[in-house]
Image: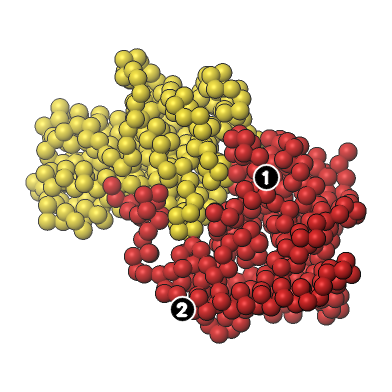
Amino acid sequence: MATVREARAGAAEIDPAVRLRIYRMMVEGRAFERRAHDLFLEGLIKGTSHLAHGQEAVAAGFAAAMREDDLTFRTYRGHLHTLFRGAPMEALMAELMGRATGICGGKGGSMHLTDVAHGAMGSYAIVAAHMPIANGAAWAALERGTGQVVVCFFGDGATNIGAFHEALNLAVVWKLPVVFVCENNLYMEYTPIAQVTAVPNPAADRASAYGLEGILVDGNDADKVYLVAEECLGRARAGEGPSLVEARTYRHGGHSRADPAKYRPEEEVREWLARDPIPRYRERLRSLGVDPAELDRIEAEAAEAVERAVAAARAAPVPPPEALSTNLWADGGSSWRS
Amino acid sequence: MAELTYRQAVARGIAQEMERDPTVYFIGEDVAAAGGVFKTTEGLLERFGPRRVRDTPISEQAIVGAIMGAAMNGLRPIAEIMFSDFFAVCWDLVANQIAKTRYMTDGQVKLPLVIRSANGGGVRFGAQHSQSVEAWAMQIPGLKVVVPSTPTDVIGLLAAAVRDDDPVIVLEPKALYAMKEDVPEGEIVDRLGAAAVRREGSDLTIAALGAMVPKALEAAERLAAEDGVSAEVIDVRSLVPFDVGTILASVERTGRLVTVEENPRLCGWGAEVASIVAEEAFWNLDGPIVRVTTPHLPLPAADALEDLAIPSVERIVEAVRGTLERRTA
């Protein structure tokens, strides 16, 4: 009988080097997105962006547990997941700024960061569309015997759209090596998820419909996320099929650049800011005996890396006009006439 | 040579590619154990086994998503969408994801996949199982679209689609599944983006697609016998990429163009052809371009009404006579 349960407590030991990696990722991610926000205000980044301030621990915990050739699928709030898989920060910043040196040559933008070389298989801007696609990548991994596992991140809002349900059903029926990770930040865009969802835990409570365990985890505790990631990745790699994890977290800002998030109770925001995953993790590392000077150094290096990325992107050219009509087709062109 | 029906030819085409390339997989609703609701995939499960030929739930988004993800990770999958009307329930995956991902990633992702589907009317299935959706597909940059009109063509174009590194939609006119033809033995591989001149003629050009091709050919025979008119019939075959050259070359000789389209009137492929010919061969035209289409209506189920809606041999003949009369008037 499938149930909903909390992730198992972090009894397992985590390698100190892994913990430092997780800390570095989260700090870099925060610094990168802060700077991206500033650049929006300066008008250097255009369009829209969906920042994940406050949600860093979910992407970092999973990235730290993944094998190099594992594949990540994620949403339009996907800057961090891409960065944490090892995508070069300069190319990500350049993509946000619409430069020729961007990771997608300027054709993707904030909502479509992709770095296939690092297993970051795309950021998908239609809610839950990537869940069936993640299945497909996992299916190919299984058939080709690559041993890869696919991790598919999605938001709480995705749990109410059909693709979520179609994907979970097929993943179980075909026993695919895929881990579905719901980043439940309590709001689907501007609306509280609880107000529009039949069950209190939008992902975990649906798991039993597909014969899965609903696993709940504190998404602001990177260690807990890491341990649950290890468990689910291990299960998938052992041929035991998919998992569904719901990580509760909170975005510090609004849904997107246009949203000041005034609809959230002040008390709620205060509570979640107090649970910010980064200071919390720093505190834990210190209590485990890590030299604060080392943590300071990581923070300084992250800030420098971001500044280097910004400087490089600012200096980079915009895409040349001929780039408009390249790479629609595999032959590199875009002609519809033969 | 062996006589094959169109539906048998579909299975032969898929088998030919699965035999050749172990990364070709085939999934869809009722395609494996049942051999397809149109019996287009009989024998594939027995021949290639349950891993490579696989039944899915009724989950079009899951089906189309699965082949997209699989294509991103090293397979060359084929999916069947049972009726092309059902593209409407997975259109996000087709139009937003499959079509755009290569461009959005500036070429990082390659999607060698095929979606094949039974398209069009003439079989009394009513408005939700009879649509001709080729205009939906050709509207979206990033999708290739072919519509084979003979058993030999469906083998060759399926093979070309599977071997192509881009996503290809293969629309099979369900009205043609019973069509028989002698098909050559051995491997058949065609190419995308090539129209075929099915009948040579000098007085006018009739461009037709899918199930309209045999009707256009029959109309041409009647026009020859009854009016002494020599009609050239072009089977468009491939909407994206589009073989503009074959049509322009024909119209430059005949000076007249009639398109025969099963799709509803507005924005059908013939409108694009008319626009191209008007722009690029205007001074060769001796009269207006005429489009024969299904009216801008959903298809009714009753045979008496459906037959009125879909272009008939009679309507094609009348349209041709109309345009030629204007010449002599």
Q: Which residue in the rendered view is the most extreme toward the top?
A: B2
Q: Position of residue A122 (x, y in %)?
A: 57, 56
Label 1, residues with CA under 10 Å away: few <14, some 14-19, many ≥20: many
Label the red chain with its letter.
Answer: A
Q: Which mark is residue A315?
A: 2
SS at mark 1 in the image: loop
Q: Residue A148 or B157: which is nearer the viewer?
A: A148
| Residue sitting at x 74%, y 80% | A262
**What number is the disc on residue A76?**
none
**Above or below: residue B215 compared with residue A87:** above
Q: Residue furthest left?
A: B328
The answer to which of marks 2 and 1 sits earlier in the sequence is: 1
Relative vertical location of residue A89 with respect to residue A168 in this rendering, above or below: below
Q: Chain of mark 2?
A: A
Rendering coords of residue A64 (x, y %): 72, 57
Q: Amino acid at mark 2?
A: Ala
Does any portion of residue A234 appear in the rendered image?
A: yes
Mark 1 = which residue? A149
Of the 4 image quadrants, the one containing the N terminus of chain A is top right
Camera-side residue of B257 and A293: A293
**Residue B65 left/right relative to A336:** right
Can I make out residue A206 in this image?
Answer: no
- Labels 2, 1: front one: 2
Chain B's colour is yellow
Identify which residue is drawn at 83% across, 45% down. Answer: A213
Q: Quadrant of residue A53?
A: bottom right
Vertically, is A304 above or below A189?
Answer: below
- Residue under the image location 27 percent in, 45 percent down: B243
Residue visible at 66% across and 62% down in the picture: A84
